[in-house]
Amino acid sequence: MKISEIRKVIDSCNWIRNDLSSATSEEFRKMDVPARLNKHIEAVRALVIPARFVRDIEMQQLAIEYTLKVIARWESKQIGS
């Protein structure tokens, strides 16, 4: 896989995660956030990035971390509702 393709996978994960921020609290609670995001997390986790692309490896880790936080936030809203 070319680095440009790797970056597209990471960018796609980040885009879908950021897109959820436009939802109201009510809309966010009603969405199946894990179903929307887990496939993107798995795609990003599956990436094999050559060691020389240090920044891309960091971006991969951050994309996973931030996306998991959105799922955790959604789960906490489910408990609180």
Image (cartoon, grey):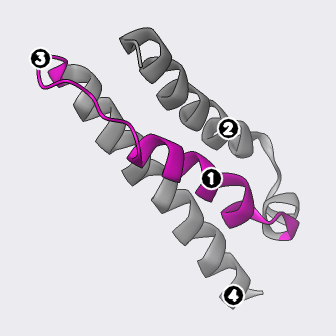
- Badges 3 and 2: C-beta atoms under 8 Å apart? no
* Residue named by callout 4: 80
Q: Is tag 1's residue or tag 3's residue first in the polypeptide sequence? A: 1
Residue 52 is tagged as 3
* Residue named by callout 2: 16
- Real-space Cα separation, disc 4 to disc 3, in angstroms: 44 Å
Region of the chain picked out in magenta, as a range: 30-54
Callout 1, which amino acid? Lys
Residue at x-position 72% and y-position 45%: 20
Q: Is tag 3's residue or tag 2's residue first in the polypeptide sequence? A: 2
* Residue named by callout 1: 39
- Real-space Cα separation, disc 3 to disc 2, in angstroms: 27 Å
- The answer to whether residue 68 is above or below residue 50 is below
- Real-space Cα separation, disc 1 to disc 3, in angstroms: 26 Å
Under circle 2, the secondary element is: helix
**How many residues crowd around disc 2 within 10 Å: few (fewer than 14), some, or many (20 or more)?**
some
